[in-house]
Image (cartoon, rainbow, N blue to C red):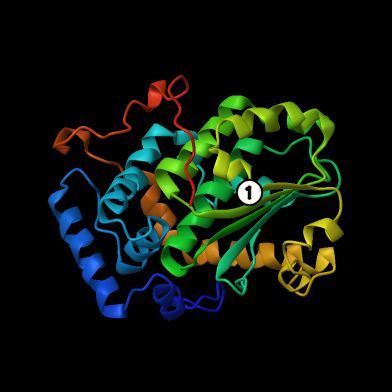
Amino acid sequence: MDTDFLKTNRDQVRKLWGKSKEEVYKDIKIVREWVETQKHLPEIPNDYMIEFILVNCKFSIEKTKQHIDMYYTSRDLVPEVYRNLHPCSDKMILVDNTAFIVLIPELTPTFFRIFVTKTKDGDVNEMDVVKAFASGLNHIQEIRLHEDLVMGDVYIFDYSNVKLSLSRQITPTLLKKWTFVVQQVQSNRIKQAHFLKLPSYLEGLMTIFKSLLSKKLRDRIYHHQNIESLTKYVSLDLLPSDYGGKQKSFEELTEMMKAKYFQYKDRFDKLETMKVNEALRTEKLDNDELLGYYGNFKQLETD
């Protein structure tokens, strides 16, 4: 595990959950032994992956089992997010050229990770929003599974450069798939979600998006028209230098992300062909009615 990129404090996060190292390893062992009995799953996740999911699931063994199953199963349930989108491939270069999708290496004082996405200034008509979503939902999460451990996430979505033509790609279906992945696959613990300079022509989609969320999470969504408003919640110490913050610039953070993707190239190569063998599944997956989830969508739960 390379700790140069994402700074964390595993011992402190465990302590905040009231867990000793020995207790965490005991839980990991229980989960690993369960995975070994699930012959339909293509691999046994490593200890870092299991612990990351355990924390996201508040150390519920049963929820961790469900999310591990969905981590592998979702690759064919939501192929738009997971299939044929290798982060080191030429087709993903355009995303890097048109958008910043980055993590802040430093944690907040309460051990939360900050995720920031911002469309680049200039002509972005060729940007593929679906690929951008895939990068944010899939590629970044994969790195985090292997290297990160936090109490939760703070999201910042900067819409200051989003044009009307680009906004037409952001459909209700895309929003539903985003919430499905966050809920059923990643179980990320969202502390805050900040929308910066949301244009009026996206307000309708925002209304739809909020309707998919629990009231608790809707109450954690904040709208800002300037950086000064945002810094009432997120310190400048933890924002990119482009915002006047003390972190690296968007360009520098993007290069760090790209380097990390190439470091994990073999892992992403493996994920390209990794599949669940449904013929070997012994129990019906609770949420395998995904093809009908549009009409039976469950609200996103949060802490």
x 73%, y 73%: residue:
247
Residue 287 x, y percent position in the rendering: 33, 32
Residue 120 x, y percent position in the rendering: 79, 50
Total marks placed: 1
The quadrant in which residue 130 appears is: top right
Answer with left or right where residue 190 lies relative to residue 18. Answer: right
Q: Which residue is mark 1?
A: 220
Residue 196 x, y percent position in the rendering: 78, 48
x 17%, y 37%: residue:
281
Give whichever of 48, 110 is nearer the camera. 110
Can the viewer see residue 147 in this picture? yes
Can the viewer see residue 84 in this picture? no
x 38%, y 27%: residue:
290
x 74%, y 74%: residue:
237
Other residues around mark 1 within 10 Å, as few (<14) / some (14–19) / many (≥20): some
Residue 227 x, y percent position in the rendering: 84, 58
Q: Secondary structure at mark 1?
A: loop
Q: Is residue 196 above or below residue 28?
A: above
Q: Is residue 213 above or below residue 230?
A: above
User: The N terminus is located in which quarter?
Assistant: bottom left
